[in-house]
Amino acid sequence: MLRLLCGKKLRVSQATLWFLIALILRIYVAATTRILATDGVAYLEIARSFDRGEFFEGSAALFSPFYPVLISLLTPLLDVETSAVSVSVLMGSLTVYPLFGLARRFVSETRAWAPTFLFVFSPYLVRQAGDVLSEPTYFFLVVCFLRLFYLMVDGREMMGIWAGVTAGLAYLARPEGAGLVFAATMILILFNRQMAWQRRRALALSVGAFLLVSIPYVLLLREHLGYWTLSQKGSYNLAVAMLQVTGDPAITPDNVCSYLLAHPWLYLQKVGQNLASVIGRFGAVLHPIVFLFFCFGILRGRLSLSHSREGRFLLGMMIFFGAAVSLFWISKRFVTPLIPMGGVFFAGEGLIAVRDWLLRRRLKRHGLVARARRSVNCLLIAWCSILFLTKMGLTQRAEKRYLKDVGVWIDEISPQHPPKVVCFDSRIAHYAGGKPMAPSWAVQCDLLAYARRWRAHFLIVGRNSRNDLIPEFEEGGSPVDLVLLELPGDIRKNGGEELLVYRVHPEKAQVMPDAGRP
């Protein structure tokens, strides 16, 4: 398998060296990341559903199921959070193998180190691979798809089936994976019609394999939601727009058409704003220095990648997915797949161009210049590594580590196990050992009424947002069923004074008639 992804045996050895470096970096960040991502709580809940054998409930959950399925495979050996982090670390590190093979195919044998190095040391990608997020799994599948797709283009027809299966798994990992195989096919037809015609059978096999893997999940969503959609977790911004215009937040074809007909110019304005923010987000995620390399790699006229068929293919894929993010107002976090999809390849070309400029390639290539080239390579790697490692030391969400402390403290003092915790941040409830009961509309609802309805044991709100979330305080009242608890000194010192933790007394609460477990 490694020979298939990387190529020759010597290249596998080089890729394994990069893999080990990537694995060490990601294990370090995973060990020093104090609190998991907000979406991570949902992934853990879905994984627990699969672990209990509740396949339908897990598959019909808000997030795509493939990453939680991988987590559930490790839960017999590890606890669920460690399993989730282990999957992210492993997938983020294994991406090196297909990426190195693609770099050899798209750039050259001698330049493959540049994009691989930028991927391995990218601070943003390293931090994501040390957290409970589906992006590392999705990145691995995207790069594997691109590698298998070009093996198919090079004449290995049966690779089309595996490329389609990989694209289907990418869709099951994140909803934007639904466009992989179709975008790749259209872009290949656009830039190389003769090759696309010669490979028409392999392309058909690829599309068929993708549909075979993905259609069961689409049918399951149709059964669960009652309308056709590719993902239950749609764009929040677009859903709000649908609610304002049509009164229905569901992102269905009818609602989208109604919105476009009612506010066409407003939609175009929003698309333009989102496109600008996508470009800015891409530059920030790629790292400012690497983004400069990326721009340099595209603008330099004599670079092989930017003027080759492979380069145009990668650039077309990036434009397609960047435009999809802008047109459908998808979360700007979705721009991160553009990095392994092409960002590191063009940035690697830019890095090589900077090296060649420093060496003044116009000089004759004699032994001294060759030795100088190796020295400059080492200097560039050392310089970029120092920049990346400095930023990598700022582990993800370190400023909110007190949220975990609050959750663990609640678990220790609670007479009920597991406690029912209602809060604005589901991670607190997770670390408290209870079922998260933070409604998605928390910023717009009365959390106290919600806590009373579900007979919660604890209610946590932010100090600054207390009056907004609990109207009885804003009206000058003081709910009799709430008792403010004092946080320990070490938690307050770490930033816990921003939170207010209340114990809810059910015997004093006016419980709503339809109370029960959510």
Image (cartoon, rainbow, N blue to C red):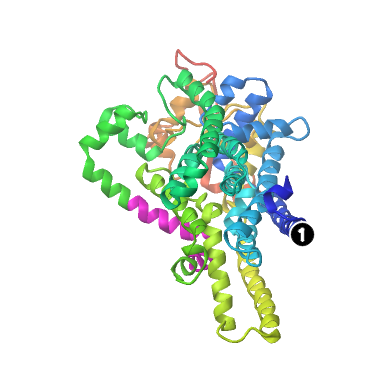
Give the residue at x 37% y 41%: 328
Which residue is label 1 attached to? 10
Magenta span dominant secondary structure: helix
Question: Which image quarter holds the N terminus?
Answer: top right
Total residue callouts = 1
Part of the protein shown in magenta: 273-294
Q: Is residue 275 magenta?
A: yes
Pointer 1 local density, CA inside 10 Å: few below 14, some 14–19, many at least 20: few
Q: Relative to the observer, which residue lies in front, 139 or 146?
A: 146
Q: Is residue 326 magenta?
A: no
Q: Is residue 460 above or below residue 24?
A: above
Residue type at mark 1 is: Leu
Give the residue at x 66% y 44%: 88
How far across and how far down the image is residue 50, in percent? Answer: 65, 25
**Residue with the most extreme top position:** 513
Q: Is residue 467 above or below residue 246?
A: below
How far across and how far down the image is residue 339, in percent? Answer: 53, 54
